[in-house]
Image (cartoon, grey):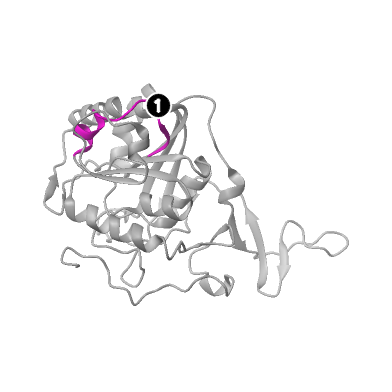
């Protein structure tokens, strides 16, 4: 789809728009979005399949980001939530802009287990997600995003019963409230069905946490930099409506292919039985979880 005139929200349900987000945003309705997942290009030079984003001077990038929020903010409902992805350098540039437009509530820092080493610096293997809301009324369902961890020190009460943990045949586990430090995320790799050649693809598990925490079933989720389609795929699997905008046609094709797969395979790696699991815990999860289809090919630029 390509937008050339004002579009009602009803025509944008579960749609991938092939267009530059600044151009498309001019035709979007007002106040229809419950959750905005914003993963713009960081202030780095990066080639997105022929669409080159060049690193800018700090003030120039801040100005660019402010202009982006200016066209996206009118689409948000008064009780909407906004998540913005960034690296550590970009975070310092966008924070003042976010504070000028929204209520900034937290900064999530998540660990990537991948990353190149550095000889004269600390290895950079974290990214940020800024948690913002339009106002004081917003959705946050902490029960939907609890993390299931193995109990290292299984304390018991005076009567010998487990204290704040569950004892079972599969082992001893505790459901913990999520913090703003995420160490349970796995970057998609070659054997994972969700993996593509997109250079900055976010894991489905990461996006699922945002969607489950800050939207209800049937809510409208908007991703104006859809990339290879992760936000749309997660929304399909979790019964949310979605709108994605992506300027690269190849990426749009990958997204549509992944959305089609989601109709027959709604599993999200690292999320099972209504809870999130620690990294490398597949053997601890229930046997009735659909198996990962590692035999499916990765989506590449030459995939047919």
Q: Is residue 205 above or below residue 136?
A: below
Residue 301 in the image, given as x and y percentages of width and height: 17, 63
In which quadrant is the C terminus drawn? bottom left
Q: Can the viewer see residue 197?
A: yes
**Badge count:** 1
Residue numbers of the magenta segment: 20-37
**Judging from the image, what secondary structure is the residue with disc 1 in?**
loop
Tell me where residue 244 appears, x and y as whole percent. Answer: 31, 44
Task: Report the quarter where the N terminus lies.
Answer: top left
28 in magenta: yes
Task: Give coordinates of residue 141: x percent, y percent.
Answer: 58, 42
Residue closest to the far top:
100
Q: Is residue 149 magenta?
A: no
Residues 236 and 78: in front is 236
Q: Is residue 14 left or right of residue 147?
A: left
Query: Measuring 35% from the left and 31% from the top, which residue is drawn there?
Result: 95
**Residue corresponding to mark 1:** 31
Q: Is residue 37 left or right of residue 53?
A: right
């Amino acid at each position: 789809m390509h937008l050339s005139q004002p579009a009602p929200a009803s025509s944008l349900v579960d749609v991938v728009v092939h267009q530059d987000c600044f151009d498309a945003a001019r035709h979007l309705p007002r106040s229809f979005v419950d959750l905005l997942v914003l993963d713009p290009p960081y202030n780095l030079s990066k080639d997105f399949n022929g669409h080159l984003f060049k690193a800018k001077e700090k003030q120039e990038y801040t100005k660019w980001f402010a202009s982006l929020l200016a066209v996206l903010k009118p689409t948000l409902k008064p009780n909407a939530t906004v998540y913005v992805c960034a690296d550590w350098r970009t975070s310092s540039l966008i924070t003042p802009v976010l504070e000028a437009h929204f209520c900034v509530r937290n900064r999530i820092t998540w660990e990537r287990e991948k990353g190149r080493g550095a000889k004269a610096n600390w290895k950079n293997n974290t990214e940020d997600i800024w948690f913002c809301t339009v106002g004081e009324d917003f959705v946050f369902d902490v029960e939907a995003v609890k993390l299931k961890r193995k109990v290292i020190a299984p304390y018991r009460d005076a009567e010998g019963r487990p204290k704040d943990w569950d004892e079972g045949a599969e082992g001893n586990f505790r459901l913990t409230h999520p913090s703003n430090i995420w160490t349970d995320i796995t970057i998609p790799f070659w054997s994972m069905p969700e993996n593509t050649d997109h250079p900055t693809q976010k894991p489905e598990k990461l996006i699922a946490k945002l969607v489950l925490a800050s939207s209800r079933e049937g809510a409208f989720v908007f991703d104006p930099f859809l990339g290879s389609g992760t936000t749309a795929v997660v929304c399909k699997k979790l019964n949310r409506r979605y709108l994605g905008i992506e300027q690269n046609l190849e990426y749009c094709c990958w997204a549509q292919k992944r959305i089609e797969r989601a109709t027959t395979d709604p599993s999200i790696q690292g999320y099972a039985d209504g809870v999130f699991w620690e990294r490398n815990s597949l053997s601890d999860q229930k046997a009735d979880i659909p198996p990962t289809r590692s035999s499916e090919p990765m989506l590449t630029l030459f995939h047919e």
